[in-house]
Image (cartoon, rainbow, N blue to C red):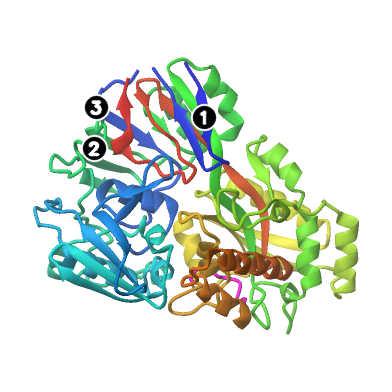
């Protein structure tokens, strides 16, 4: 067993090349804790869902396994020479969908307009777009409210659908996942990607086979001809399947068992920094919380209570005991690879129960209060265990926490529908720019922005600054706006950062792959040894 880890560029990329035996040379058996929430590519902007979509669909612009942007369904792009508010994309010719339909500019226009619908979790990425139009069979122009230098960065996870197929099957509208809607596009796919969906039983097994007409067949190794995906939520069961040779590739290796995996023959471990923060969100906007025992007031609206909760979290203990050293405690709401990150933001407060109790007393909650903490139990590394640890920490300052741990399919709608007062969330930044964090998490919740802001927080001055980021071409001025926004955000403390998550992947020695900081596996890159 070999275990070779290479970190490329300031924690931007974790690369693991591992060598060793698989029962079937071309079939790759894959497992992770979480299943895709839906097959609608524009519904849920969520890691495991987007990962599965990347096997079946393609965006215009993609990130390779080194985190670099490269052509996908667009071969060239750049600002218009006539209008700085317009980006021009040249569309790849000769591409077909899995159903045999030809791909052209009309499909791009349809897909981007669809991704801007209210029910889409991707609409914030296109919030500055005024119009999308085709100026030829293979040319698309995207007009924005002002010059938008980072527009291509926002397109790497927005998948292209076939307009005719969508219309024929009544799939023009994005699935409203938070409302529990079931649609044709949530259960059926027709992409241009490297793999075709052969069968699927949600939460049981999904089988993908190589697309023989894939436009990138000669550009990637394409050694994987079949992917069998079996989600296994239970860590012990997932580990047993890997150690027993039942799966070849596993995400979410249990941190408590890494040494056991490292000592095993025929398999290897990949580890490295991840582009993801784990934190608690607080409902600061409600006049009165629904799931607490304080009548006529919202204790979380008091900044002293929020600060007390912040310093009551023992991040080092969570790292050492719960995460077995596999986390990076932080006070930042963005990971280091992201534009806008600074060392100062990274600092987190000292654990201080006595000072926290004094703040609670000062705020008028010396006798404490009770509240519900909503937590996923199948999304992040040891997510429920982190929440259980926090329950004990908050109890030390008089806050009695009722823990409700649910699968993420039930947890995420609580945030989307504003039905939680205190919740865990993890956040990656695929654009590698702070605008992504502010757009989704800090902007006032509107039709076009703030869809993951479950805190009720609203600051018009911050909103105006956030909107300006999409059209500011003076990068020095833009970076200053980002710095000012982080100063304001840190003072508000509507989120309590816990740590940056760490990647741990396992793979059979029969395969070589790359592990990127986004935890975004793409099977066209896998190579047989």
Name the one closer to the observer, 158 or 144. 144
Q: Earlier in the sequence, mark 2 or mark 3?
A: 3
**Residue 6 disc label:** 1
- Residue at point 49% right, 43% down? 517
Specify whether residue 522 is in view: yes
Q: In x, y percent, where is residue 153?
A: 41, 58
- Residue at point 48% right, 79% down? 446
Callout 1 secondary element? strand
- Residue at point 37% right, 26% down? 512
> In which image quadrant can residue 382 be found?
top right
- Residue at point 58% right, 45% down? 501
- From the viewer's perspective, tell me whether residue 486 is left or right of residue 185: right
Name the one closer to the observer, 94 or 88. 88
Q: In x, y percent, where is residue 303?
A: 77, 72
Residue annotated with mark 3: 26
Q: In x, y percent, where is residue 438?
A: 55, 67
Q: In x, y percent, where is residue 26?
A: 24, 27
SS assignment for the magenta stretch, majority = loop
**Disc 3 residue crowd, few under 14, some 14–19, many 20+, Cα 10 Å:** some
């Amino acid at each position: 067993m070999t275990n070779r880890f290479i970190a490329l560029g300031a924690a931007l990329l974790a690369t693991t090349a591992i060598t060793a035996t698989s029962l079937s040379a071309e079939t790759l058996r894959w497992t992770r804790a979480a299943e895709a929430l839906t097959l609608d590519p524009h519904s849920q902007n969520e890691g495991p869902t987007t990962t599965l979509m990347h096997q079946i669909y393609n965006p215009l612009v993609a990130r390779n396994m080194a985190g670099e942007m490269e052509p996908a369904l667009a071969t060239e792009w750049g600002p218009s020479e006539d209008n700085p508010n317009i980006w021009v994309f040249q569309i790849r010719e000769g591409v077909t969908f899995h159903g045999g339909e030809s791909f052209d500019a009309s499909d791009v226009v349809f897909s981007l307009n669809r991704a801007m619908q209210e029910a889409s979790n991707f609409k914030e990425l296109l919030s500055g777009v005024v119009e999308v139009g085709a100026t030829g069979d293979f040319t698309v122009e995207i007009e924005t409210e002002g010059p938008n230098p980072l527009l291509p960065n926002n397109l790497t996870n927005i998948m292209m659908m076939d307009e005719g197929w969508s219309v024929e099957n009544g799939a023009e509208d994005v699935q409203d996942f938070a409302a529990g809607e079931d649609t044709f596009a949530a259960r059926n796919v027709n992409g241009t990607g490297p793999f075709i969906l052969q069968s699927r039983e949600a939460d049981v097994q999904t089988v993908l086979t190589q697309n023989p007409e894939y436009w990138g067949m000669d550009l990637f190794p394409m050694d994987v001809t079949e992917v069998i995906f079996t989600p296994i939520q239970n860590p012990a069961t997932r580990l047993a399947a890997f150690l027993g040779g039942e799966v070849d590739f596993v995400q979410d290796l249990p941190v408590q068992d890494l040494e056991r995996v490292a000592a095993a023959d025929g398999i290897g471990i990949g580890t490295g920094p991840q582009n993801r923060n784990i934190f608690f969100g607080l409902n600061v906007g409600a006049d009165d919380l629904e799931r607490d025992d304080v009548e006529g007031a919202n204790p979380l609206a008091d900044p002293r209570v929020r600060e007390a909760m912040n310093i009551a979290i023992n991040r080092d203990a969570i790292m050492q005991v719960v995460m077995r050293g596999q986390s990076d405690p932080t006070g930042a709401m963005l990971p280091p690879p992201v534009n806008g990150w600074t060392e100062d933001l990274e600092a987190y407060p000292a654990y201080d129960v006595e000072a926290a109790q004094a703040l609670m007393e000062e705020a008028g909650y010396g006798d404490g209060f009770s509240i519900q903490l909503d937590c996923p139990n199948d999304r992040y590394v040891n997510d429920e265990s982190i929440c259980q640890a926090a329950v004990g920490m908050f109890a030390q300052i008089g806050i009695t926490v009722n823990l409700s741990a649910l699968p993420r399919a039930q947890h995420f709608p609580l945030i989307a529908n504003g039905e939680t007062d205190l919740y865990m969330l993890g956040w990656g930044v695929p654009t590698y720019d702070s605008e992504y964090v502010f757009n989704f998490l800090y902007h006032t919740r509107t039709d076009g922005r703030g869809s993951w802001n479950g805190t009720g927080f609203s600051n018009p001055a911050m909103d105006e600054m956030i909107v300006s980021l999409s059209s500011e071409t003076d990068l020095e001025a833009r970076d200053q706006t980002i710095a000012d926004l982080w100063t304001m955000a840190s003072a508000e403390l509507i989120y309590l950062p816990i740590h940056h998550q760490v990647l741990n992947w396992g793979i059979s020695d029969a395969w070589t792959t790359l592990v990127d900081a986004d935890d975004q596996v793409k099977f066209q890159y896998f190579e047989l040894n």
